[in-house]
Amino acid sequence: MEEDSHVQMMINEDNKMPCGQEIGNDDRTNEQELEGVLVGDEGEKPKAGMVFYSEEEVRNFYNNYAQRLGFGVTKISVKNGNDGKSRYFSLACAQHGKSVSTAKDSYHPRPSTKTNCKAKINVTAKDDGRFIIARVYLDHNHALNPGKVRLRCNKALDSHVKRKLELNDLVGIKRSKNFHSFVEACGFENLLLTGQLRLRFGDAEALCNYFYRMQNRNSNFFFMIDMDGEGCLRNVFWADSRCRAMYESFGDVITFDTTYLTKKYDMPLASFVGVNHHGQSVLLGCGLLSNQDTDTYTWLFKSWLACMLGCAPKAIVTDECKAIQEAVLKVFPDSRHRLCLWHIMQKLPVKLGGLAQYKMIKKIFENIVYESVQPDEFEKSWAEMSIEYNLENNEWLKSLYADRHCWVPLYVKWTFWAGMSTTQRGEGMNAFFDEYVHSKTTLKQFVEHYDNALKSKVEKERKADLASFSSTIPTITVLSIEKQFQNAYTNEIFKLFQDEMRGLIYCNVSVIKREGPMSTFEVTESVVQKDGIYSEEMNYEVVYNETECKVQCLCHLFEFQGILCRHAISVMMKEKMNEVPSHYILERWRKDIKRGYTFMENAYDDYSNNEQRHRSNKLNPLFHELQELGAESDYKCEVLIKLLKEAKETLLAIDSSCETRQINQVIGASN
């Protein structure tokens, strides 16, 4: 075989074997002498000439190497002999090869993981059962991500799980909704719960046991207990170490979720939820409440603020509730407070459904809320609706109008809300535990499965991190601006930016005036319905400051969501800008930022009997602090590197001496 001629054996000087010569089948003595060099060690790089004694050994060796560096592995170029056994194969980087798009819609291309990477090892199989690395290509043409790579698992489903999935299909339950059926195959606990959260016998004990267990795992676990005058439990708040660490990255905007305080659930659970760099919801704390008055919410908010070391969020979203509004004003006076529009729109049938002309009022109400562009336009239309339908004395509408700056889109769009939509119940506004809490879950059941819920969220984020790092959403234009965001943002956020790129074909730009560095443009956007029928034209004023390289659009999408709008991009193109200024690429949405909480151990795994994990848990906070200190300057970085290398040598010497003593003890006992 051609590849066999390229086998280069790594030998020592005494053997005098020339490079390129294979070890013969009858040369077992030399092979035994060389075995320590030839057989791949776990921490070693692949080298031509390494010898293994099964295909599994080769794969395990290369998989371990790939995980350390941060790339996936795939098997290619398999050649079998007449006996059906492998004679030659290659293990390559998972981004090997070129991607050929099969998407019918070129405006919605599918993610690609292929970069034509050449990194691989070629392996030949000998008749005597040896597997030898013939060629090695180590260089990758893409970034590597140590610690974030997940190797594919080909574990077959057992008959029980297969049958369960088949039954789910028969009754119409989608597999994507039956995560527990899949995790059984991979060894996770059943994550799906039944029931409703209620305070019953054993609930308090379960909660205390959970707090004790979590504090044992990590001393940064935080909880507060509120007792009444008679010493009875009234309110509880808690946040684990990961929640607290995530707040450093995603604490700019939070949602206070009160879904489980409604009559539908009849539960005392409230949660603080943020949005991560993929637009996924992340938990930032939980509370169990005995009441829904201002004092209770004030206690909870103060407890949460103490947990987060007094750092209030820049913006907070809550339901329309006077008690919550008063508590927010007391505890977070400097935070921008927004009422969830989705919750308000859900109340329309309850508050106005009894009116004779409800359908018409609802249509006008929605049009005023969603289509108003300027404040005077909104206020004029609201007044006309109130007079025409005799709604001036409706108390609910009067309170909404008084709070209009807290919920109407045109009033709140100046503030950054991390993509928490004003028009629907987006990801960030979902009840965080919806998959785990149902109509009859007791508090004891909830606490027992709380870790599973958090573990699932951690896993989703890791998968999204891996997808953003190892796959690329193809661009839909040749514009360098789109390429700039493709390289910077996570896949899910880049998709949102591509929606604006698609909208460019409906935009027409014209100059209104130019005064020195300031230019004002009018962007006319043709609004086309889903059926392709032209609807109307919308005009947006865009102001461009050439000196500061800043552009501001009347729609304020960038201020609201952190995504440049199609109108602003249209102006940039007209001004022949080939690159977006750095202040329009937010770190919050970037995929290449190493955030502190990702270095933490998973606090939701039970490792009570794992002493190594306990020791690792003690070391991780110190490592994180050292990393932050070392990153402050080049000098500190060099000092830290030197100290860590010295520490590594010391630890390796300790391991080596201990091993030597153990071997000597064994030899002495045998003598």
Image (tube, rainbow, N blue to C red):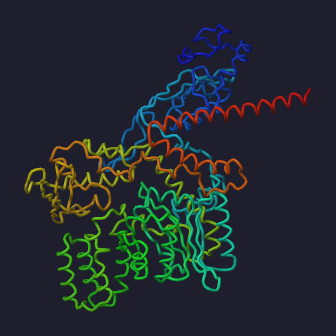
In the picture shown, does residue 124 fall above or below 605? above
Q: Residue at x 61, y 16 (%)?
A: 9
Quadrant hosting residue 318: bottom left
**Residue 537 appears left or right of 529:** left
Let me know if residue 412 appears in the view: yes
Q: Nearer the viewer, residue 347 or 563?
A: 563
Q: Nearer the viewer, residue 112 or 70?
A: 70
Let me know if residue 73 appears in the view: no
Percent x, y of residue 299: 51, 76
Q: Nearer the viewer, residue 414 or 24?
A: 414
Q: Residue at x 52, y 83 (%)?
A: 291
Percent x, y of residue 658: 76, 34
Q: Residue at x 21, y 52 (%)?
A: 550
Most extreme residue toward the right is 671
**Residue 432 appears left or right of 572:** right
Quadrant hosting residue 565: bottom left
Percent x, y of residue 384: 18, 84
In the picture shown, does residue 470 fall above or below 313? above
Percent x, y of residue 617: 63, 51
